């Protein structure tokens, strides 16, 4: 049979004939519903030739947050005379007409454009979109570039343009990155726009070849473990439906570079069926902490958490430690790093004049006071200027701030931030903001955890799929037993049997007695989910009325813009 030549539509549009509009936005934050565009920059290119550029500042209709001005260099004075988005948007939509849009972390920029279109009554642009972040993760390895930041890729492809968080400059740099990525994609036989779009999401040959690994996995809740040929655990996950979840790793929907790399090494999938979804989540955490699989990023090193300790010396001080001891000391934590613990310590020192020296001090020893005494930040117990009884007042204030009432710390640091802001010392104020956040968030978390780790035994139930009840026994914040009570079963003997076979839990020292903080948080999320009913509580489950949780909402609000600002660029490549 003679071969039939394909049509141009079947062959696709050669990349050399595609008109790309590479664009970038600067905004007042990361939430399109609440924040606004401050600058648009775009470059139209085809076959490596620049056809035109589009660049304009945009009046956001409100003040630009100081930290955004520091990041972009765009100030309120620069946009006061700039056109508003309702004037700019029609021109930009005309500029991109018929082109393929390209952006670095395209989801961020396209969300703002779509939000502006919706607000002004324009239909959202239907242009094809290429994300250079996704493309970089597909064609580059971690050995070549450690992450997918625009500045990193621009250096790798030797772009003469250095990104600087200004829209047109960043768009020009992205043009060079796009051309470098397209050239690299050519080695994968990608030559048309259609091939480029499907290439990013296409399953790798290893994914297609190893689909059989999911065949023996059941449709049940539990934990799955990918292992290599030597039996080393590569990755651990959990799911309410093991079969469906494991199958998804071998489809085009799985685009994470490190997971695709893991699939290439994996030779088998082992599974552990669990009674309930909560049991699967807890078992996953415990297995990850024990096996420390190299392709898991979270929960691998629970033992590396650190604590802020109020010591039990004659004149106690705040010390950063890794171990919880049964020594009567007060602990705050856990912190994921020593830096965060030190930030919280500095915030607490702002409110309470505890000594900050590390030398042992007793009633008999005398040492020369440091500069902190001259600044009024320490009562100099080292020189005997402050008695143990007087110093004990500060110790009790610190203990109360750590465990019951964070208001003194919040007020003291907030007042300092206000003074620095009035003096336009914004960078110093932001440092204090981070310190306050470290203290408040950790105090709120610890108080929430302590409320349940104090309870010797708690039994709760939630409706199970298909009838019946998922029942869990929790002892000192640790999951001790899980079971599914069938529909129509009398609850009293079932619960009694579950308690009788539950794990014996012996509480340890500190706020988190018998489980990792992550495990107890998993249990708390389940307890707070809709439909959960308490069966019995041995003790009291309560939070302090003046606890840190009431300040945490204000802290989280202050960080919302920072947390949402281009969250994907810095992730490492495969």
Image (cartoon, helix red, strand yellow):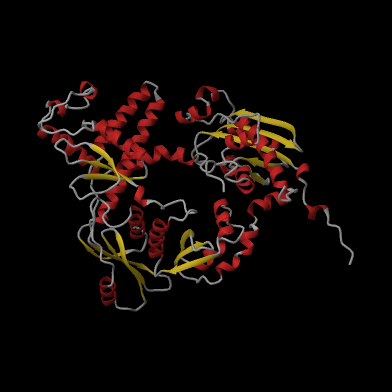
Residue 4, by quadrant, is bottom right
Name the side, left or right, on which 250 lies relative to 473: right
Q: Quadrant of the N terminus?
A: bottom right
Evaluate whether residue 119 shows in this view: no
258 lies above or below 232:
above
Residue at 69% x, 44% y: name it: 184
Question: From this viewpoint, is residue 451 visible?
Answer: yes
Identity of the residue drawn at 46% across and 41% down:
563
Estimate the x, y position of residue 19 in percent, counting from the top left: 74, 40
Q: Is residue 401 left or right of residue 96?
A: left
**Image location (x, y in percent) of residue 131:** 62, 44
Q: Nearer the viewer, residue 101 or 398?
A: 398
Answer left or right for 526 relative to 54: left
Residue 381 against residue 571 in the figure, above or below? above
Residue 488 image offset from top left, x and y in percent = 34, 79
For the point 30% across and 60% down, the residue is: 478
């Amino acid at each position: 049979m003679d071969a039939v030549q394909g049509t141009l539509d079947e062959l696709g549009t050669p990349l050399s004939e595609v008109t790309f509009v590479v664009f970038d936005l600067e905004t007042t934050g990361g939430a399109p519903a609440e924040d606004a565009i401050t600058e648009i920059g775009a470059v139209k290119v085809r076959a490596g030739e620049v056809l035109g550029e589009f660049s304009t500042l945009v009046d956001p209709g409100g003040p630009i947050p100081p930290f955004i001005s520091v990041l972009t260099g765009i100030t309120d004075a620069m946009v006061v005379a700039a056109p508003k988005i309702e004037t700019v948007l029609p021109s930009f939509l005309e500029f991109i007409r018929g082109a393929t849009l390209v952006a670095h972390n395209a989801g961020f920029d396209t969300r703002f454009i779509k939000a502006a279109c919706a607000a002004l009554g324009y239909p959202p642009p239907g242009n094809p979109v290429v994300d250079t972040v996704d493309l970089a993760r597909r064609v580059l390895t971690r050995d070549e570039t450690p992450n997918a930041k625009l500045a990193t890729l621009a250096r790798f492809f030797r772009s003469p343009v250095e990104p600087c968080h200004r829209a047109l400059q960043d768009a020009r740099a992205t043009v060079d990155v796009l051309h470098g990525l397209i050239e690299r994609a050519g080695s994968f036989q990608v030559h048309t726009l259609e091939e480029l779009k499907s290439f990013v999401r296409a399953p790798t040959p290893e994914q297609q070849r190893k689909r059989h690994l999911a065949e023996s996995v059941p449709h049940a809740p539990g934990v799955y473990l990918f292992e290599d040929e030597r039996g080393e655990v590569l990755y651990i996950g959990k799911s309410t439906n093991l079969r469906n979840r494991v199958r998804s790793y071998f489809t085009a929907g799985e685009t994470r570079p490190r997971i695709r790399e893991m699939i290439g090494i994996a030779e088998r999938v082992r599974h552990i069926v669990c009674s309930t979804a909560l049991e699967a989540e807890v078992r996953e955490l415990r297995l990850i902490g024990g096996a420390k699989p190299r392709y898991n990023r979270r929960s691998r090193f629970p033992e590396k958490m650190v604590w802020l300790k109020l010591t039990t010396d004659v004149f106690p001080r705040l010390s950063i430690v890794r171990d919880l001891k049964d020594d009567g000391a007060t602990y705050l934590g856990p912190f994921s790093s020593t830096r965060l613990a030190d930030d919280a310590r500095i915030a607490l020192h702002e409110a309470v004049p505890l000594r900050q020296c590390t030398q042992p001090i007793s009633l008999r020893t005398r040492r020369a006071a440091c500069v902190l005494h001259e600044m009024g930040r320490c009562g100099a117990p080292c020189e005997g200027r402050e008695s143990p009884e007087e110093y004990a007042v500060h110790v009790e204030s610190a203990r109360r701030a750590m465990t019951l009432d964070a208001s003194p710390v919040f007020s003291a640091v907030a007042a300092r931030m206000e003074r620095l802001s009035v003096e336009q010392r914004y960078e110093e104020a932001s440092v204090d903001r981070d310190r306050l956040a470290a203290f408040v968030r950790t105090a709120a978390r610890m108080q929430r955890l302590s409320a349940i780790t104090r309870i010797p035994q708690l039994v709760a139930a939630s409706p199970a799929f298909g009838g019946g009840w998922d029942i869990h026994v929790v002892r000192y914040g640790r999951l001790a037993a899980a079971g599914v009570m069938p529909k129509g079963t009398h609850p009293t003997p079932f619960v009694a049997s579950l308690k009788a076979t539950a794990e014996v839990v012996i509480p340890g020292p500190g706020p988190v007695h018998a489980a990792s903080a992550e495990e107890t948080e998993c249990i708390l999320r389940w307890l707070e989910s809709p439909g959960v009913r308490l069966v019995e509580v041995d003790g009291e489950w309560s939070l302090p009325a003046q606890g840190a949780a009431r300040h945490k909402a204000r802290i989280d609000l202050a960080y919302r813009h920072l947390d949402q600002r281009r969250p994907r660029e810095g992730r490492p490549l495969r």
